[in-house]
Image (cartoon, grey):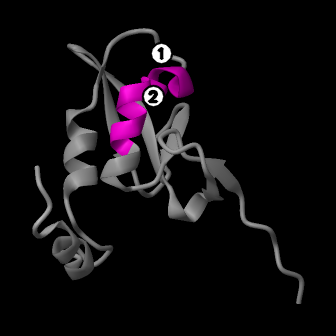
Amino acid sequence: MVRRAQPERTCVGCRQRAPASELLRIVAVRGEAGYSLQPDPLRRLPGRGANMHPDPACFALAVRRRAFGRALRITEVLDHGVLAEHVDAPTTTSGQPDRARVASRVGRPT
């Protein structure tokens, strides 16, 4: 049986390469107030996408470096509120809270 190589993408936050299945695809959706970043976990939304680990640390790095605008080729200000809520929500694919992630946050200074 021949094994096919999985596509690799680069995280816009930490700049590490990973299989596309481990990364969250992000697209910019134009609204009335400008562009907003939307998570695309099913990888079906149209348009150019950026990839990022679904981790708050990678999200913070990408925002600090202003990487979303460069990756998506948008010069306007991007609203990343919806994406921040998606990344900060500790859920698994079943929709239930991921106990390991919740436990890792206990006792951390904010």
Taking 54 as reference, is 1 above or below it?
Answer: below
Q: Quadrant of the N terminus?
A: bottom right
Amino acid at dot 1: Ile
Estimate the spatial distance between the alpha carbons at disc 1 and disc 2, rounded to whole Å: 8 Å
Residue 7, by quadrant, is bottom right
For the residue pair 82 and 66, the one nearer the viewer reads as 66
Q: Is residue 73 magenta?
A: no
Q: Are marks 1 and 2 in contact (CB under 8 Å)?
A: yes
Point out residue 101 in the picture as x, y percentages from the top left corner. 25, 72
Q: Which residue is mark 1?
A: 74
Could you tell me which secondary element the residue under label 1 belongs to? Answer: loop
**Disc 1 versus disc 2: nearer the observer:** 2
Characterize the magenta stretch by its predominant secondary structure: helix
Percent across and percent down for residue 68 are: 45, 28
Q: Earlier in the sequence, mark 1 or mark 2?
A: 2
Q: Residues within 10 Å of mark 2 (few under 14, many from 20)?
A: many
Task: Give the extent of the magenta segment.
Answer: 59-72
Seen at 32% across and 73% down, the residue is: 93
Which residue is depicted at the point 19% across and 58% down?
Answer: 89
Which amino acid, by three-letter code, is at mark 2?
A: Phe
Residue sitting farthest toward the right:
2
Which label is found at residue 68? 2
User: Which disc number belongs to residue 105?
Assistant: none
